[in-house]
Image: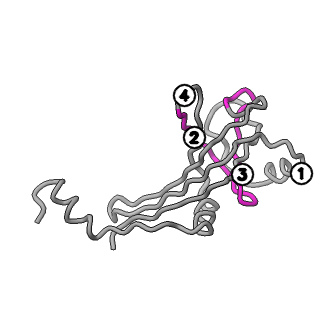
Amino acid sequence: MATDARDFAWETAATHRSEDLTETECWTLLAAQGTGRVAYSDNGRVLVFPVNYVVHDKAVYFRTAQDGVLGGGSDHRSASFQIDDHDPLRMDGWSVLLSGRAEPVVDSELLTTLWGRRMAEPWGGGQRDVFIGIQPTVVTGRRVGMR
């Protein structure tokens, strides 16, 4: 029987599993959620913001303000987007991470499609009418849990 947290960690380490998710599994999980985190570097700091998002044609899109850090100008940024879920009682969970360029959507046909998609309103205040898309170059995921 474990006597402290360190003993418990050693006892449970052998029963934990960790497995990579396929890209198809990652996209299935991405499509089933609606809130994630976008991360990018800004003046030497990594900034992370929660966003409501939608998946379309193997890309992630979210709305932001025109004058927001990712909303305006032609300074496109490398970005990462992450979602996850976990069950602390079962000691399992999963995480999906994609990385690519974050760019404002300017294609009118794509904008019409995105505005027609059902998604939660952005949580940030103010007018959030600029769609940013992340076309990923890398999509990875991992599932962890008890055996």
Which callout, 2 or 3, points at the residue further toward the start of the chain?
2
SS for callout 1:
helix
Identify the residue under disc 1: 109
Principal secondary structure, stretch drawn in magenta: strand
Gap in Å between the C-alphas at discs 1 and 2?
Answer: 27 Å
Q: Is residue 24 left or right of residue 117?
A: left
Q: Which residues are magenta?
A: 46-69
Task: Give the residue type at disc 1.
Answer: Glu
Q: Which residue is mark 4?
A: 44
Q: Position of residue 144 (x, y in %)?
A: 40, 64
Which quadrant of the figure has residue 127? top right
* SS at badge 2: strand
Q: Helix, strand, or loop for circle 3?
A: strand
State the residue position of label 3: 135
Q: Residue at x 69, y 56 (%)?
A: 55
**Spot occupied by residue 146 in the image (x, y as percentages of width and height):** 33, 69
**Cα distance, mark 2 to mark 3?**
14 Å
